[in-house]
Image (cartoon, helix red, strand yellow):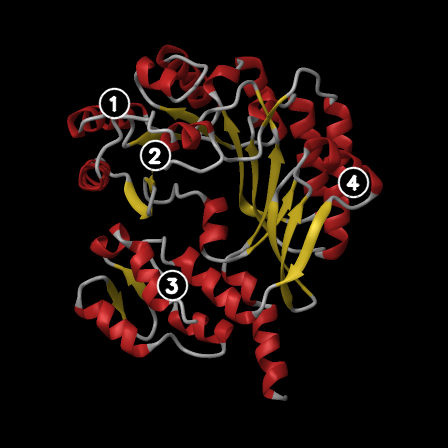
Amino acid sequence: MHSANSSRAVLAEDWQEGGFGLYLHWPFCQAKCPYCDFNSHVAREIDQSRWLSAYIAEIDRYAAKVPNRVLTSVFFGGGTPSLMQPYVVAGILERIRHHWPAANDLEVTLEANPGSVEAGRFAGYAQAGVNRISMGIQALNDRDLARLGRIHTVDEARRAFDIARNQFERVSFDLIYARQDQTLEDWQDELNQALSMAVDHLSLYQLTIEQGTAFGDRYNAGKLRGLPQDDQAADMYQATQDICGAAGFLAYEVSNHARPGAESRHNRIYWRYGDYIGIGPGAHGRLTLNGQRHATEQWRAPGKWLQQAEAGNADELRSPIAPSDQADEFLMMGLRLVEGIDPRRYARIAGRPLPQDKLRYLQDIGMIEHDAAFLRPTAEGRLVLNAVLEQLLVD
């Protein structure tokens, strides 16, 4: 076999190293949070059965392209998917199961906001086949929830969380730290409260100010005061590792902690550079077709997406990804994981190994550990991951 063909054959199967998942984006929210840069919209009237038909049309279209793959995970993200009627979730999952064989441990996650949780709706989701809830709690005191523009109170969050915990074996929730006027002691106290509630998974994010958000505008105008300094935020990150680790919630990725075995299978597909279909307004995908990995992106505006899905194709773009770009993506995603990457897989994708001089330098200064079979950042390296990546991303 010619070497170019053999390398293409290797790349054709590369996605299997990470698995195959499906992401569905529900773009609607009850209110827009000031720190959010996701594609979310507030709408008074939503024709949910029309949306269901559009999702089904897109699922059918993609199933024709990649039939018979074993599906590892389905993730309903948003927006606020817990505003979906249970029959919409049930209809989508039924169609997905019709097209693809499911892994024995298929993970079906739905994101929920505490303000939108009704016990009846949650029972409906469980019946439809959702087996994991990811809840956006964000803070455990009312002052900070108000500042973050959240429309729920801590009491409502705890009640919603209890409903979720009673319906689902697997429940995760998100918190944001390094918030305005938050001290290290505040965060340690809040994290201990969170761990006393937690089921099996926590996502703990440092507040980042994104341009194009209300927080971004406020920050640019000098009106977002009291944000912690970098060294204080680093102390909070370190406290997060220590406190969660002591409670048995091990870090398996920069911002994610889980009891062993409860890691998010869906996010692992991204981080292990598997294939995933993205369906819904603005949803991104990575999909290997005829031996070539493609980036897909769907129309962003909900109205436009709906029309295009009904017309037979809601992709705004589908473009092949060059092997060098695939290798960069694999590196950027994989080094977020505590387990790191297999450098041999990098070499197969890139057609060349990682730069040995850079690896030696990063190992000498204590930022990475590596040998022929693994490359992973150390705890120190994860703190400055972007700087580590800058060394390794070859121009």
- Residue toward you, 301 or 249: 301
**The residue positioned farthest toward the front in the image shown:** 221
- In the image: residue 342, left or right of residue 325: left
The answer to whether one can see residue 126 in this image is no
Q: Residue 313's x, y, as percent?
A: 78, 46
- Residue drawn where x is 52% and y is 23% of the image: 32
When the figure is inspected, residue 31 is found, relative to residue 395, above or below; the finding is above
Q: Is residue 309 visible?
A: yes
Task: Please state which amino acid type lies under the numbered disc 2.
Answer: Leu
- Circle nearer the N terminus (4, 2): 2
Does 115 sit above or below residue 175?
above
Look at label 3 and name its amino acid: Ile
- Return the residue at label 4: 308
Residue to which mark 3 is pinned = 341
Rounded to the nearest angstrom, the CA distance separating label 4 from label 3 is 38 Å
Quadrant of image for the C terminus: bottom left
Whether the residues at callouts 3 and 2 have beta carbons within 8 Å, the answer is no
Query: Is mark 3 in CB contact (under 8 Å) with mark 1?
Result: no
What whole-number distance in Å separates the C-alpha atoms at marks 3 and 1?
34 Å
Q: Which residue is mark 1?
A: 193
Q: Residue at 54% across / 55% down in the picture?
A: 19
Q: Residues within 10 Å of mark 1 (few under 14, many from 20)?
A: few
N-terminal-most mark, 4 or 1:
1
Judging by the rendered image, the residue that carries numbered circle 2 is 207
Q: Is residue 91 left or right of residue 387?
A: right
Marks 1 and 2 close (CB-CB < 8 Å): no
Label 3 Cα crowd, 10 Å radius (few <14 / some 14-19 / many 20+)? many
Nearest to the eye among marks 4 and 1: give it: 4
- Marks 4/1: CA–CA distance: 46 Å
Occupied quadrant, residue 323: bottom right
